[in-house]
Image (cartoon, rainbow, N blue to C red):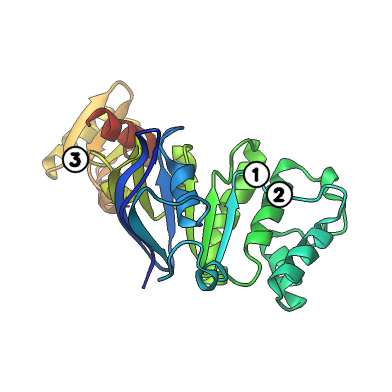
Amino acid sequence: MHRLTLQSLTKSYDGRKVVDAVSMEVRSGEVVGLLGPNGAGKTTTISLLLGLLKPSEGTCEVLGFPPGNPKGLAQVGALVESPGLYDHLTGRENIEITRLMRAVPRSEGDRVLSLVGLQQDARKPVRNYSLGMRQRLGIALALMGQPQLLILDEPTNGLDPSGIQEIRELIRSLPKETGATIFLSSHLLAEVEQVAEDVVVIHHGQLRYQGPLSGLGSAGPSQILLKVGEPAKAVQLLGAKGFNVREDTDRVWVQAEEEAAPQIASCLVQGGVDLYELSTHRANLEARFLALLEGE
């Protein structure tokens, strides 16, 4: 089942298309990243999906329902920009207010606090929470009622490295822990690479790419970096085995996929070459993303 289906979705303001005929589908049970630079139309797209805005043209479905449909919204959790929290109340009291509004069992509060790792801090006033803790509490509120789809808009925005790591680990764990599909937007490309399986790229409101990370842009071949005791001898040994090899001062680069690493290591060791380091290298998501935009 598709969690999200968009058909030529368009939103215009004063004749300017902020979202321009976007069509895409998001399947269930995965983490999908919505990527684009600031102003690309990410938040507007999410607002259209949630029924906060009405499209100028086109259609979309969320869990098989039109945006804003109560039956669909009951199965969707969302955190758009910063979470709306009551700072003078404790984390648990914030949870309890949402629990009562959504009419879910009391056990749901304990479940979501456990999922986001806030059990020990649940009785502290929210005004004493760090930004990372506030963001985790916002995600806990969005998880109330066991939604099938969780929509997160820039979930790591403004966080320090420690907070980013916390949210990253949480997002990675949620599909397995809850069964929910995660649809998150970000301009932090390296962060999306850490959590998402598939990506949707929009630029100037238009869809540029949808698919797996491995197919984004032109990634180029994988390379294996070697640090060895005798680079020239390593080049000779590996070249004889048919590998595409080049020497770079005290390092050796082999054009090969990661699966070839054991064969490469065995060849060097058997040939009497000391191997100090072996690591794989591929163009990162940011480089591929920028190449995709520049290639328009």
Nearer to me, 254 or 38: 38
Relative to 10, residue 293 above or below: above
Relative to 152, residue 68 above or below: below
Q: Few, some or many C-alpha atoms within 10 Å of disc 3 (few <14, some 14-19, many ≥20)?
A: many
**Kind of element beneath mark 3:** helix
Question: In x, y percent, where is residue 27?
Answer: 37, 65
Which quadrant is the N terminus positioned in?
A: bottom left
Q: Residue at x 61, y 43 (%)?
A: 164
Which residue lies under the disc numbered 1? 82
Q: CA distance from mark 1 to mark 2?
A: 6 Å
Q: CA distance from mark 3 to mark 1?
A: 53 Å
Proximity of marks 1 and 2: CB atoms separated by less than 8 Å = yes
Answer with the quarter of the image where residue 73 lies.
bottom right
Nearer to me, 83 or 125: 83
N-terminal-most mark, 3 or 1: 1
State whether residue 261 appears in this view.
Answer: no
Question: In x, y percent, where is residue 150?
Answer: 53, 61
Q: Residue at x 56, y 62 (%)?
A: 173
For badge 2, the amino acid type reads: Gly
Relative to 23, residue 285 above or below: above
Which residue lies under the disc numbered 2? 84
Disc assigned to residue 238: 3
